[in-house]
Amino acid sequence: MSTDWRPAICVQGRPETLSSRSIRLKVDNLGPVVAGQHIDIRLTADDGYQAVRSYSLSATPRGGPGGTPLGNSEVEIAVEELPEGEVSPYLVEALAPGDPLEVRGPVGGWFVWHPTDSEPVQLIGGGSGVAPLVAILRARIASTSAVPMRLLYSVRAPDTVYFADELASYTTSPNITVDLAYTRVAPHGEARPPGRLTDRDIENFVQEPGSGIVYVCGPNSFVAAVTDLLLARGYDSAAIRTERFGGA
């Protein structure tokens, strides 16, 4: 990982939900990038005040949205606007193509997936925590790997689903399965009633214990609850990789 701050510019922004946005960045001297990593972003105000936040990569240079590679030295992040946030409102509402910022990273060597990895993968995400998991799915699709991947995505309601169209398109991808679990409002005809993930969901939508690696990402409380469910079902803690976030 590079610890140096490097110049970056916004290349593109597009809405994901009513309160979130995918942002494509071009970073000077980006270097190697692995799906599952995150970057630090630093903003500097006119009076010199600086704010730093970390965001998971949702796309890597080769594993871009919809199977289309990004440009050289480009990555994408997905940002949820937090009402009391200091940085996210600017990134979601104001950052425009051509605007500068600073980037450090990519960071992380544990919560990552390489195309040479051979074990089946279970992905479990809550809310915006699906971002690095989608990066892993995109990297898998962009590679020659045929490793089975399954995503269990917990969201409040249909209009809060990140990457909705792309996730729906994965139904035609060999060895990739996507399951959505709604916590507050489910679409008409959904068999699973709204609610938080339970042991029944782990039994129905998650690969069997001992059959591969499980990646869990989301808010602190979500990751803690899911990890407890996995351990109770017999998963080895060494097979569970977690990434969590909280606060503004």
Image (tube, grey):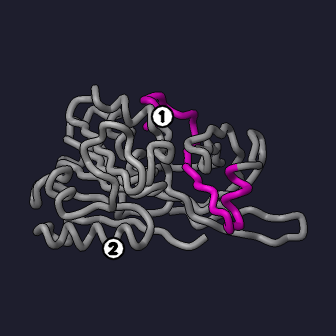
- N-term-proximal mark, 2 vs 1: 1
Q: Give the percent coordinates (x, y) of residue 246.
A: 51, 71
The answer to whether residue 53 is above or below residue 101 is: below
Residue 59 in view (yes/no) = no
**In which quarter of the view is residue 15 placed?**
top right
Q: Give the percent coordinates (x, y) of residue 123.
A: 29, 52
Instruction: Depth check: give the residue in front, 45 or 187.
Output: 187
Callout 1 amino acid = Pro
155 with respect to 81 (left or right) = left
The answer to whether residue 174 is above or below residue 54 is: above
Residue sitting at x 29%, y 47%: 151
> Which mark, residue 244?
none
User: Disc 2 versus disc 1: distance between alpha carbons?
Assistant: 29 Å
Residue sitting at x 43%, y 37%: 63
Identify the residue at the far right of this view: 47
Callout 2 amino acid = Ala
Q: Is residue 107 magenta?
A: no
User: Which quadrant of the figure contains the C terminus?
Assistant: bottom right
Residue occupied by mark 1:
65
Callout in the foreground (2, 1): 2
194 with respect to 70 (left or right) = left
Residue 223 in view (yes/no) = yes
Q: Give the percent coordinates (x, y) of residue 76.
A: 55, 45
Segment tinted magenta in the rendering: 63-92
Q: Give the percent coordinates (x, y) of residue 37.
A: 45, 57
Dot 1, how many residues are within 10 Å of its Cα: few (below 14), some (14-19), or many (20+)? some
Residue occupied by mark 2:
224
Q: Is residue 71 magenta?
A: yes
Residue sitting at x 33%, y 59%: 195
